[in-house]
Amino acid sequence: MKRVGFMGPKGSFSQEAVKLYLRNLIGYKGVSYYNISDMIKLVENGNLDEAILPVENSIEGAVNLTLDLLSKSNNIYIKSELVIDVNVNLLVVPGARMDDIEVIMSHPQPIGQCRNFLNKFLPRVQIKQVYTSAMAAEEVSKLNDKKCAVLGSVTAAEEYSLEILKSNIRDEDNNNTRFVVISKDKVGNTGRDKTSIIFSTEDRPGSLYRILDIFNLWDINMTKIVSRPKRNELGKYIFFVDILGHIDDSDVNDAITMIKRKTSYFKFLGSYPIYINDKI
């Protein structure tokens, strides 16, 4: 039985993502972990077959912790991606009402996705950020306190016997989170693929422009670029880039070969099938 790690505890949005990923796979099971770093290390040393990690949200943007950890990872690759529609709900213990709520607990991402709702309907409540929204649901369930509420998933409500006081309270209709699946194995060319790379430029004027222009020269579509601080030196950045195509495509391979020569740091994160969803 192959194991796929996801951010727990049970009831997290990551659990909803792993359910989607595993629905057509036989011989796989999801295993919850409390730390993204631990999951990546377990995949690196072969003690976990795969792990599913959140990388970006359509409202709040990149999940910086995941990007930073991927930049430091070794011998692992993205083998798949998937996108889930994030339905954030206001969860309470049975019998609680809006007027009872004094504290709301959740991960920073759902909090950011519901700012307008909070400002309009619960402007005076205390916001408490926690590591995952599922952990918040577990804590509120144990406290059994009507003063405490959670911004979380339907799965969390089911797992911890909480009531959904308000459903689908996200500020934007298009609230999606993208996840990637990592493993030690690369995947082959499907003809409809995406490639993810990380690089750092030389400290010279126009360095980033010259690298990005390589994609233009080979007529390659760049679908995302995110910058993150290099952390070991002020003012230096690494760039996460997604492009269309597979590393085995001649134009993609030639472009990446040239980019390697013009960067001070380069990492190939993987080529993998583009996720197809009716809403995306």
Image (cartoon, helix red, strand yellow):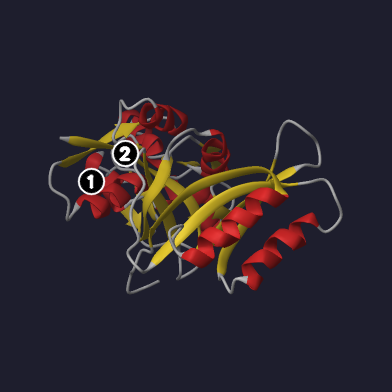
Q: Residue at x 62, y 67 (%)?
A: 215
Say which amino acid is labelled 2: Glu
Residue 109 higher or lower than 50, as above or below: below
Picture coordinates of residue 248 (x, y %)?
Answer: 43, 59
Q: Which residue is mark 2?
A: 50
Q: Secondary structure at mark 2?
A: strand
Q: Which mark is residue 43?
A: none
Picture coordinates of residue 234 (x, y %)?
Answer: 80, 36
Q: Which residue is mark 1?
A: 158
Circle 1 residues within 10 Å: few <14, some 14–19, many ≥20: few
Q: Residue at x 52, y 59 (%)?
A: 253
Q: Nearer the viewer, mark 1 or mark 2?
A: 2
Horizontal relation, residue 244 to residue 91: left or right: right
Q: Residue at x 60, y 71 (%)?
A: 218
Horizontal relation, residue 49 to residue 228: left or right: left
Picture coordinates of residue 15 (x, y %)?
Answer: 30, 45
Residue 242 higher or lower than 231, as above or below: below
Q: Residue at x 29, y 52 (%)?
A: 154
Say which amino acid is labelled 1: Glu
Picture coordinates of residue 198 (x, y %)?
Answer: 59, 48
Mark 1 vs 2, N-terminal side = 2
Q: Secondary structure at mark 1?
A: helix
Distance of mark 1 from mark 2, alpha carbons? 26 Å
User: Between residues 98 and 26, which one lies in front from this camera angle?
Assistant: 26
**Looking at the image, which residue sits at the far left?**
26
Q: Quadrant of the N terminus?
A: top left
Residue 28 higher or lower than 170, as above or below: above
**Looking at the image, which residue sits at the far right?**
205
Horizontal relation, residue 103 to residue 214: left or right: left
Circle 2 residues within 10 Å: few <14, some 14–19, many ≥20: many
Q: Quadrant of the C terminus?
A: bottom left
User: Between residues 196 and 42, which one lies in front from this camera angle?
Assistant: 196
